[in-house]
Amino acid sequence: MTRQAVLEAARSRFSQDGYAAATIRKIAADAGVDASLVIQFYGSKDALFAAAMSLSPTALTHLSQAFDGPPPTLGERVTNAFLDLWEGESQVSEPLLAMLRAAISNDQGAATLREFIQTRLLEQLSPKLPDGHDAAARAGFAAAMLIGIVVGRGIVKVPVLVGTDRESVIRLVAPAIQAVLVGV
C-alpha cells in the first residue's frame, strides 16, 4: 500500500510541477513517508518517474479503438478519445501531463514522451489508417496537433481554450484532424 501511495504522489507531483521541480522529498511528504523509503522502493528520481509514467493498457486500447469505424467520422472519434486520455481520469491524465511537462524541461522527460508517442501511439495506430505509405507521418502530425491543444488547455491554460467546452473543442478541431488523417 505504501509503495502505491508513493507512486500516486509521484504522478500527482510530476503532473503539477514537472520533472525538474518535483523532488523526492516533496513526493515523500505527499505520500506521508520518509524520502529514504522512496529511494529504497525506486532507487532514483528517474526510476520513480519511469514507474509513475506507466499507463494502463486499457487507456491506450480506448484510443486505438477510435481508429475502428467508418472513415468519415475518424477525426471526431480520435479527437474525442485523445481528450478522454489527456483530460479524463486522473490516474491516466496525470502521468501524461507529467510526461508532457517533463519533456519541456528535461531530456529524460523528452525521451519518455518521444517513446510514448512513437511506440505507443504511432506504431500502433498508423496501420489502422488508410493508404499506409504516409500513415505514420499523418498519425504523428495529428498527435502533435492534439498535444498542442492539451498544452494550451492543460499546461499554459490559455483562457479562451480553457473556457471552451469539450464538445466545442471536438467540433472545431475534429475536421482538421480528419483532414490530416484521411485527407479531405
Image (cartoon, rainbow, N blue to C red):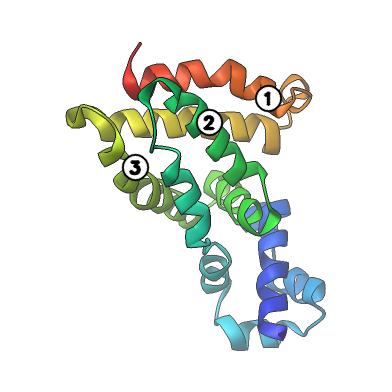
Q: Earlier in the sequence, mark 3 or mark 2?
A: 2
Q: CA distance from mark 2 to mark 1?
A: 10 Å
Drawn side of residue 95 relative to residue 117, left or right: right
Classify 10 Å Cα crowding around label 3: few (below 14), some (14-19), many (20 and above). Answer: many
Q: Residue at the location (66% across, 54% down)? A: 94
Which residue occupies the foreground of this view, 104 or 7?
7
Q: Measuring from the top left, give residue 2's x and y in whole percent.
A: 72, 85
Q: Which dot marks residue 167? A: 1
Q: Residue at the location (61% across, 42% down)? A: 84
**Residue sitting farthest toward the left:** 133
Q: Are marks 3 and 2 in contact (CB under 8 Å)?
A: no
Q: CA distance from mark 3 to mark 2?
A: 14 Å
Q: Secondary structure at mark 1?
A: helix
Q: Secondary structure at mark 2?
A: helix
| Residue type (three-letter) at the residue carrying disc 2 | Thr
Q: Residue at the location (42% across, 29% down)? A: 142
Q: CA distance from mark 3 to mark 1?
A: 24 Å
Q: Measuring from the top left, give residue 97's x and y in whole percent.
A: 62, 48
| Residue type (three-letter) at the residue carrying disc 1 | Glu
Quarter occupied by residue 170? top right
| Residue type (three-letter) at the residue carrying disc 3 | Leu
Classify 10 Å Cα crowding around label 2: few (below 14), some (14-19), many (20 and above). Answer: many
Q: Secondary structure at mark 3?
A: helix
Q: Earlier in the sequence, mark 3 or mark 1?
A: 3
> On the image, numbered disc 3 is attached to which residue?
125
> On the image, numbered disc 2 is attached to which residue?
79
